Image: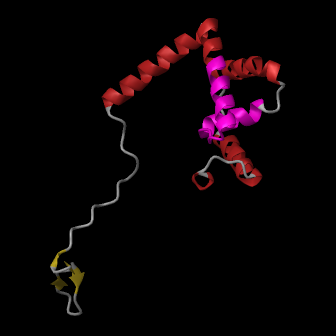
Amino acid sequence: MIMGGTGESVPTTYHGKQAPEAAPFPAGPEPMPEKKQKKRLIRTAVGRTMARSARVRRWQIRRMLKFIDKSKEKGRRLPPEYADMARFLAKVPKAQRGEALEKAMEANQEGVAIGRDQRRAAAAQQRRSGQGGGESAR
């Protein structure tokens, strides 16, 4: 509805029909449903348990390295988290990539909390270097 010059409301039309009322903007992201939240917690717990096993961890590392190498050969774009990892591993000799990735995974699993300022600085650094994995890079 639009207010007329005299203060009365005038119906707004859209191709001869009443315009739909605009939905109010949500206050923020909707909370995750309880069922999804529970699934996420279970997946996280299973992943942590599996990562403790050296055999499973090494299998996962070999699989990730193979995926990165094949994607590079075929000229495919890596997902952002793998792109960062590939950039890190490019600085390491090929024979030591598995060990370096395992150390990085172990450090990540220890739950080292990175502050908001550090995350923002890292993102800004990636944008400046032109290697960020943002939407514009796709």
Asked if residue 3 lies left or right of residue 50, the reply is left
Quarter of the image that includes the N terminus: bottom left
- Residue 20 lies in quadrant: bottom left
In this rendering, is residue 67 above or below 126? above
Residue in the picture at 17% in, 84% down: 10
Tell me if I can see residue 111 in this picture: no
**Nearest to the observer: residue 30 or residue 67:** 67
Residue in the picture at 82% in, 27% down: 92
Residue 119, how many percent across, how many down?
A: 66, 42
- Residue 73 lies in quadrant: top right
Residue 126, how many percent across, how many down?
A: 72, 48
In this rendering, is residue 106 above or below 37? above
Tell me if I can see residue 75 in this picture: yes
Q: Magenta span has 31? A: no
Residue in the picture at 40% in, 50% down: 28
Magenta portion: prevailing SS class: helix
Residue 57, how many percent across, how many down?
A: 62, 13
Residue 79, how many percent across, how many down?
A: 59, 38
Q: How many marks?
A: 0
Query: Which region shows up in magenta?
Result: 61-89
